[in-house]
Amino acid sequence: MILYDYILSPDAYKVRLMAALAGVKLDLRAVDVHPGREHESEPLRALNPAGSIPILIDGDLILTESAAMLVYLARLAAPEWLGDGDAAGGARIQQWLSFSPRLTDHLGGARATEMLAEPGDLPALQQAGIIDLRQLEAALIERRIEGQCFLAADRPTVADIACFPYAALAPDGGVSLDPYPSIRLWMRAIRMLPGFIEMPGIHRLHELKPEPLSTETPETV
Amino acid sequence: MPVELHRDWIPVALSADLPAATVVPAHTPSGILALWRSESGKLTALADRCPHRGMRLSYGFVRGEALSCIYHGWSYGRTGQCQRIPAHPDLTPPAAIKAASYATEERNGVIWIAQNEPQEPPPTLDGFKPLRSMPLAVDADRLSPTGEVRTEFAGIDMLLLIVATGNGEAVAHIMIAASASKDDCVAASRAAEGWRRDCERLALEDRAS
């Protein structure tokens, strides 16, 4: 299974993360998005006319939407990530998969404007991103009242993975996560999952590893 | 007892939002603190700035009974004294490497930080339990000159503890009647969203006129 990937793309990270959590091995092909704009080149347009990253290829199947990739990986290797199949639970997962592109547009748009100097109305993108985060926070508060910590079930699902990266990277677009205690606890629960992997800007939980021994050479000074 | 008599204490977070071995940024009228709970459950509030390179300590992590900075791993104990510098494992950190610390109290599910030297403990808020903390893009004085709002959400008695967090913004720590059911809590949380939209719309209209 081939993933056309870019290390700084939160959408590509969703797919790498889901694959890691589901135990699927991906054949990664790094795409020079910045500064090369390789995703807009003819060979990649031939796979994905929209010119976006990631692209997942498995035999004849070509997927260009990250939510579809999450569902595909889960169905293949980890069906418990699709919920238990009841109508409300399934709809709740679909609700968050459909919600996730709003995070991409708003918080992701603010991040691209801030970090990559893409054109965009930064204050408007940030304001729209705050409305999205408030919706996420309100939903997670209701889950916590029910004694749950994930978005759509009593366990993590593809819904959590679809929403996690752009929410976690909100500060890259100048949107603080300080005011959202339930989002922060939810992100912590995701980062605690066995098999969790990092991307630049989303680090692992250092406290889960034991204190390094004093004889080891530290990574930084 | 009204909250206004306790202005030496600032409510900064709800206990449920700070489980053991975690750290959160606590916004107060005079700035942000790194509020953390050790693995054994002890609360500490430190200035949110690592004395080494100025990184926010609230971006750090709690391991055991110490808070570590995310940047270079310098760790701090409950007094704010630096305990360990990973790059110099044999060095006892000098006493001067210390983050300022603030008194904390936890009562009835609310965490308070002392402003001055309080003569008495923070209020118990009898009859209420914590629901959620909610940020608003509204001046705190506009919401309440006393730091306290008593109201009803979805027909349920509520007590809102209002704290200014700078830049014309505020946080409402929302308490709900202690007898409220889970369904009541969900209904009140949804009503709180509407209350915030109203408050922010009115504040915007005022600014425009």
Image (cartoon, coloured by chain):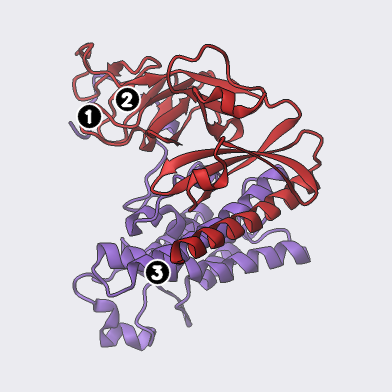
Chain colours: A purple, B red
User: Which comes before the other along the chain, label 2 or label 3?
Assistant: 3
Residue at (44% x, 44% y) in the render = A178
Query: Callout 2, which amino acid?
Result: Pro
**Looking at the image, which is closer to me, A180 or B153?**
B153
Query: Callout 3, which amino acid?
Result: Ala
Question: Split into 4 quadrants, where in the image is the N terminus of chain B?
Answer: top right
Horizontally, is A179 left or right of A10 in the view? Answer: right
The residue carrying mark 1 is: A218
The residue carrying mark 2 is: A212
Give residue A30's position: percent from left, percent from top: 28, 67
User: Element under label 2?
Assistant: loop
* Nearest-to-viewer mark from 1 and 3: 3
Mark 1 belongs to which subunit? A
Q: Name which quarter of the figure residue A35 lies in.
A: bottom left
Mark 2 belongs to which subunit? A
| Whether marks 2 and 3 lie on the same chain | yes
Mark 3 belongs to which subunit? A
Residue B21 shows in the view: yes
Q: Are marks 2 and 1 in contact (CB under 8 Å)?
A: yes
* Nearest-to-viewer mark from 2 and 3: 3
Give residue A128's position: percent from left, percent from top: 46, 66
The residue carrying mark 3 is: A124
Q: Residues within 10 Å of mark 2 (few under 14, many from 20)?
A: few
Horizontally, is B80 left or right of A187 in the view? Answer: left
Q: Disc 1 and disc 3: Cα gap in Å?
A: 42 Å
Residue at (64% x, 48% y) in the render = A141
